[in-house]
Structures are given as C-alpha cells and as structure tokens.
Image (tube, rainbow, N blue to C red):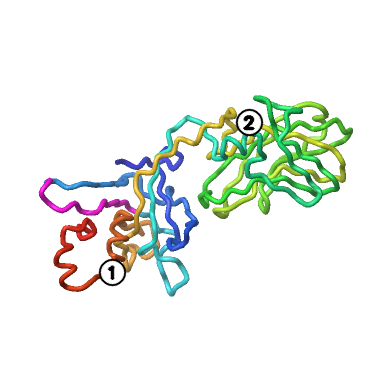
C-alpha cells in the first residue's frame, strides 16, 4: 500500500495520544509521513501450517519540528500509542451526520439540542427536501441550536453546512458555525425562503458543537434541513450517504526511535512500526497455571 505525497489524497494516517480512552482523540499526521517511502501494511502468513503473525504497518515519519522527540518530557513520544490508517474515496461527498440528524425524515429531532429559551421540534410545516425539517422557535438573543460531534480528527479540515428557512421577520439574522471556533457570515434577508449557510474549519478537538445561531433578540420560528458535515474545504451537494471511509489498519506503535537522526534538522526522519490491535490484546492476556497453559498452546492468542 503506497502513501501519496500529497496529504489531501485518499490515504490518511492518524495517531491517538490517549489510546486508553474509550473515545481516542485522533490526530491527523498524514502530512508528516514521507511520501517517497510510503506506508506498508502486511498481514497473513506465508505458510498455512505456520502461526499467523500480527499485522504490521510501517512508515517513515518526518519529525523536523521535534513535536514527537520525547525531549525532557516536553514532547509526546508515540511509542505504544495507537495508530490507524484509513482510505477515503476521492471526489465522493459524504455526510458525517446521521441521516435523521441531517434530514429529519424519521419524524424526530435526531441528535440536536438547544439553548434555554429555544424549542426544537420535528415538523412538516416546511421542508427543503422530503417532507419534514427541524423547527427552531427562538426567544431572546445569542441563542443556538446544535448537533454535537465526538469523532472528529484533530488537524483535519471540515465543512459544516445547513439549509435554513427564516420565518418572515424583517431584519432577522441567522448563521452557522462551530462553538469556540467561529461563525459564518450572518444572513439578514432570507425572510420566508430557504438558503444554505456553510462554515469551513479545522478541528482543534475530537469533539465540537456544530451550531445554527442568532445574534439579535427575536421571537420567531426558523426551520433547518439538509444539514451536512464532510471532510475538506469544498461545499459539496447535500447527501445523507455516509462518508466513503475504509479503515485499513488499527494498532499500536511497537518500534519507536530513542534518538532522531539529524537532531531536528532536515534529516530528522525515522521508520515507525506498528502492530495490529489484536497483538496488543494478546499481550495483555493473563497467564494461568502451568498445566492450563500447556494445554492452551493452540489458543490463537499465542500466535501473538
């Protein structure tokens, strides 16, 4: 498997600095992988009569910035940290939101929540597509309705968008954005009509809140439909189809350099090796009695 030099291409490498967490905070390090050497993933055995070795992933990491030098405890080492490699089909849009949180055709409000003084409901009064949408009854100012996301990759670019129907109030305003990061340009002239708002951002955390919000004080009902979050900076046509992402490797870094060649200069690169997640689980297996272990030699975990 060959890794492309352009980090915007489909194969991505991610690491988690908190691998013990039930929800690892993945960080995109694709741009640090040296494209010339590629990413190599091997699995299986050469002989059906031999034990199957753990899957192995190797790649060369560019550490000229020293971010992973483990110097005096100031920079994190990736030794024994979790790593995964995924493939994203190029040129195909996908939605990281569930179909119900995006289109509301199932008759619920999906995963949406809101500020105090804001009422959410599934409605057939207005719909940008299909027959239903999310009605948002605003009361007050600086209010928001949001969808929480907890599986974003730190350092990756995303585009968040939604179609909004502004309910006929002169001078009304509405925008979309990400809590703690920013907001799109606010629209003030979409009275009794649908319009699409979008906001492109780089994830600074694995969890963000995607918002539809108002600034000025108002009492009115707006409608949200066609909500979409996808990777990249391109505003693609709305879809409820899941993003075409296939995970090729998931494991833990097993070989890590104690010293980086070049001391942080242009030659500071080193080969990193990771073993399949299953091999890690096998090592965590507690041993039983000598007799029990003697009769358990055929256990698959012994292959690792």
Q: Residue at x 72, y 42 (%)?
A: 212
Is 259 on the left or on the right of 239, as rendered?
A: left
Q: Residue 95 at x, y = what percent?
A: 55, 36
- What is the quadrant of the N terminus in the image? top left
User: Could you tell me if residue 39 is visible in this image?
Assistant: yes
Q: Residue at x 87, y 35 (%)?
A: 171
Q: Which residue is mark 2?
A: 105
Taking 292 as reference, is 137 above or below it? above
Q: Earlier in the sequence, mark 2 or mark 1?
A: 2
The residue stretch that appears in magenta: 48-60
Residue 195 occupies which quadrant of the picture? top right
- What is the quadrant of the C terminus in the image? bottom left
**Numbered disc 2: secondary structure:** loop
**Crowdedness of circle 2 by 10 Å Cα count: few (<14), some, many (20+)?**
many
Dot label at residue 286: 1
Q: Is residue 190 magenta?
A: no
User: Label 2, label 1: how many angstroms apart (C-alpha)?
Assistant: 49 Å
The one nearer the camera, 9 or 304, is 304
Is 112 on the left or on the right of 292, as rendered?
A: right
The one nearer the camera, 171 or 165, is 165
């Amino acid at each position: 498997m060959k890794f492309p030099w352009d980090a915007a291409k489909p194969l991505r490498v991610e690491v988690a600095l908190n691998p013990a967490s039930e929800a690892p905070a993945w960080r995109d390090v694709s741009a640090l992988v040296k494209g010339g050497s590629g990413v190599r993933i091997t699995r299986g055995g050469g002989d059906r009569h031999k034990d199957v070795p753990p899957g192995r992933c190797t790649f060369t990491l560019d550490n000229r910035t020293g971010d992973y030098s483990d110097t005096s405890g100031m920079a994190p080492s990736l030794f024994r940290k979790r790593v995964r490699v995924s493939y994203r089909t190029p040129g195909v849009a996908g939605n990281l939101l569930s179909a119900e949180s995006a289109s509301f055709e199932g008759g619920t409000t999906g995963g949406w929540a809101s500020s105090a003084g804001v009422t959410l409901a599934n409605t057939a009064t207005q719909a940008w597509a299909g027959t239903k949408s999310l009605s948002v009854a605003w009361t007050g100012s600086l209010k928001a309705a949001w969808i929480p996301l907890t599986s974003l990759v730190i350092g990756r670019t995303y585009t968040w968008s939604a179609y909004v129907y502004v309910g006929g109030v002169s001078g009304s305003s509405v925008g979309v954005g990400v809590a703690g990061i920013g907001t799109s340009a606010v629209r003030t002239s979409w009275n009794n009509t649908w319009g699409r708002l979008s906001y492109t951002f780089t994830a600074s955390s694995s969890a963000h809140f995607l918002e539809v919000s108002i600034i000025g004080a108002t009492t009115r009902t707006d409608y949200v439909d066609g909500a979409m979050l996808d990777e990249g900076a391109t505003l693609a046509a709305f879809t409820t189809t899941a993003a075409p992402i296939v995970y090729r490797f998931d494991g833990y870094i097993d070989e890590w350099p104690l010293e980086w060649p070049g001391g942080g200069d242009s030659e500071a690169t080193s080969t990193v090796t990771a073993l399949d997640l299953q091999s890690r689980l096998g090592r965590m297996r507690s041993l039983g009695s000598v007799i029990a272990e003697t009769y358990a030699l055929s256990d698959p975990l012994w292959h690792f």
